[in-house]
Amino acid sequence: QVQFVESGGGLVQPGGSLRLSCAASGIIFRLFAMGWYRQAPGKQRELVASIGRGGSTDYADSVKGRFTISRDNAKNTVYLQMNSVKPEDTAVYYCNGNPSWAYWGQGTQVTVSS
């Protein structure tokens, strides 16, 4: 059974940084493209960053140049380094495959506020 456990969220001031982690299990991690998604209150979940099996990356325009996605196949873990965060980055962040599976983890809350 596929499972994702996200961590690393919290309260951060505008302009600050956070590093999110997501541990995956139940899949042969190295065989799948992975993504970080977020859902803000009253909005649909959106894909903000993705990383292919070979390490190629892609980003939503809203986070390009500020966020960096990476993966460690030995640890079955995908990371999201968030720099220069903005209040509009406030959301619950999830990881999943890209395309995503039906199962979603609990996510980790990121709140950007002074």
Image (tube, rainbow, N blue to C red):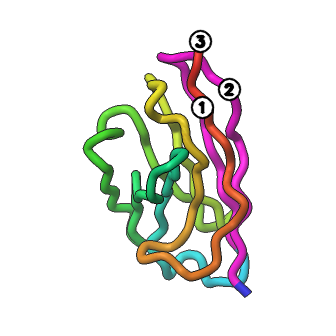
Disc 1, SS: strand
Query: What kind of residue is marked 3?
Result: Ser
Closer to viewer: mark 1 or mark 2? 2
Q: CA distance from mark 3 to mark 1?
A: 15 Å
Secondary structure beneath disc 2?
A: strand
Task: Pinpoint residue 101: horizontal percent, then vertical percent.
Answer: 54, 81
Residue 1 in the image, given as x and y percentages of width and height = 73, 87
Task: Return the mark for residue 18.
Answer: 1
Identity of the residue drawn at 44% across and 23% down: 84
Magenta stretch, residue numbers: 2-24
Residue 33, relative to residue 46: is it above or below? below
Which comes before the other along the chain, label 1 or label 2? 2
| Disc 3 versus disc 1: nearer the observer | 3
Which of the 4 quarters of the picture holds residue 102? Answer: bottom right
Would you say residue 17 sits in the magenta stretch?
Answer: yes
* 93 is higher (above) or lower (below) than 9: below
Pointer 3 with pointer 1, Cβ within 8 A? no
Q: Residue flagged by tag 2: what amino acid is it?
A: Leu
* Label 3: few (<14), some (14–19) or many (≥20) C-alpha neighbours in 10 Å: few
- What's under tag 1, amino acid-wise? Leu
Residue, disc 2: 11
Place of residue 88 in the rendered image (x, y in percent of width and height, measured from the top left): 44, 32
Q: CA distance from mark 1 to mark 2?
A: 9 Å
- The residue wearing badge 3 is 114
In terms of image quadrants, where is residue 78?
Answer: bottom right
Report if the CB atoms under discs 3 and 2 are less than 8 Å apart. Answer: no
Q: Earlier in the sequence, mark 3 or mark 2?
A: 2
